[in-house]
Amino acid sequence: MCVCRSGIVLANYGSSWRDHRRFALTTLRKFGLGKRSMEERILEEVSHICTELESSAGGSMDPQHLFHLTASNIICSLIFGERFEYDDPVILTLIQRLEELTKEAFGPWAMLYEIIPALRPFPLPFRNISHKFNQMKEHIKKIVTKHKSSRVVGEPRDLLDCYLDQIDKTANGGSTFNDTHMVFLLLDLFMAGTDTTSNTLRSAVLHLMINQHVQDRCYREITNILEGRADASFEDRHAMPYVQAMIHEVQRMSDTVPLGVFRTTCSDTQLHSYQLPQGTMVIPNLSSVLHEEGQWKFPHEFNPENFLNEVGEFVKPEAFLPFSAGSRVCLGEGLARMELFLVLVTLLRRFRFVWPEDGGVPDFSLIFGGTQSQKPFRLGVHLRSSERG
């Protein structure tokens, strides 16, 4: 948006963007995206979530910080090769900076700034975004410096090592792989891998607290499929149509990214009766298709039946576009889908989520911005084992 044009998410279309996107996809696959090794990373993190939730069993807690830590650690294990303890100052500082930055950089004022360039000279409320973004950059640079001290050339442990190897390989060829682009890429992956997933998890437990019949049906399906097994596998999703439907319905209703990445036409383009000159800004309205009447059986209410056919099989309508579409589709879609499934299946197997006495009145309205999130709420936690006892 208004803070950078490097990296992947907001970079201008061109050879640098293509090279970095290809590099990121290839490297993420190398380190387990879509494989059992990635499942193991996620399940390890889920074990830490469960420990935290067990300490709140019988009471309530605010899940926002916990889910931020969860999503952050999973992406950090890929890009930095390590997870952080939940009280580690490194991850706590990164998350604090992320929360501050996304609140302003993807808020309504910043969106107006991007859409209406004439506003940019004026002292609007978000003018300190660049300062906060630079703080995050400096924090990432410190991690990179520490990482370099233990690096063995040609033996990459993570995406960061792979990028450093790529810099060495292309140093004399006019490549766009350099320290500056590396920091922006790491920031892109960290921010995108943390914010949207954690917000979707918060939305999931909120809807499940209020819709106990949905939670109960998910639990029955999970226990039936996983009977006698310690952990779930991503492959189990094919045998859990209702859980799949619930997760997709959460994504539809949470509407985490209402607008896709802004784009421009590369040439004069005819769109139905409209002539779009080269350079025209195009803003994909993802929110509109996720709630469009005629596309969904229940467009304005939370109901997993939106993703089930008449015989209870999981189906995904074409209007389901939470990860956007086209060449700018979210490159972390595969990771996000695996995270949401494994985290929610594991949590629902061990805990029942209930609306707590100190929760006030449920509020499903969203905090508007480039990324949207639920307003703060309390999560009531009960152990399934105590219910069975």
Image (tube, helix red, strand yellow):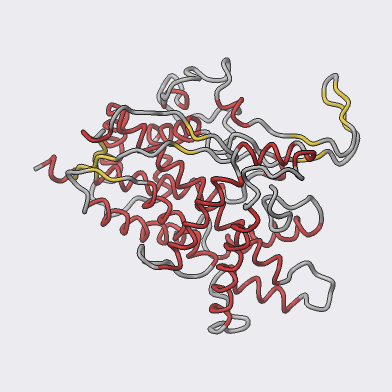
Residue 212 appears left or right of 269:
left
149 is higher (above) or lower (below) than 204: below
Quarter occupied by residue 326: top right
Residue 309 appears left or right of 257:
left
Query: Which residue lies most toward the left here?
Result: 389
Viewer-proximal residue, 67 or 324?
A: 67
Viewer-proximal residue, 190 or 363?
A: 363
Residue 266 appears left or right of 383:
right
Q: Position of residue 216 (x, y in %)?
A: 26, 32
Quarter occupied by residue 360: top left
100 is higher (above) or lower (below) than 186: above
Viewer-proximal residue, 251 or 256?
A: 256
* Quarter of the picture holding the C terminus: top left
Residue 130 appears left or right of 367:
right
Q: Position of residue 295 (x, y in %)?
A: 57, 19
Q: Position of residue 194 (x, y in %)?
A: 50, 52
Q: How many marks?
A: 0
Image point (48%, 20%), residue name: 300
Q: Position of residue 230 (x, y in %)?
A: 27, 54
Query: Which residue lies most toward the top here?
Result: 294
Image point (57%, 82%), residue name: 151
Viewer-proximal residue, 11 or 159?
A: 11
Image point (63%, 35%), residue name: 259
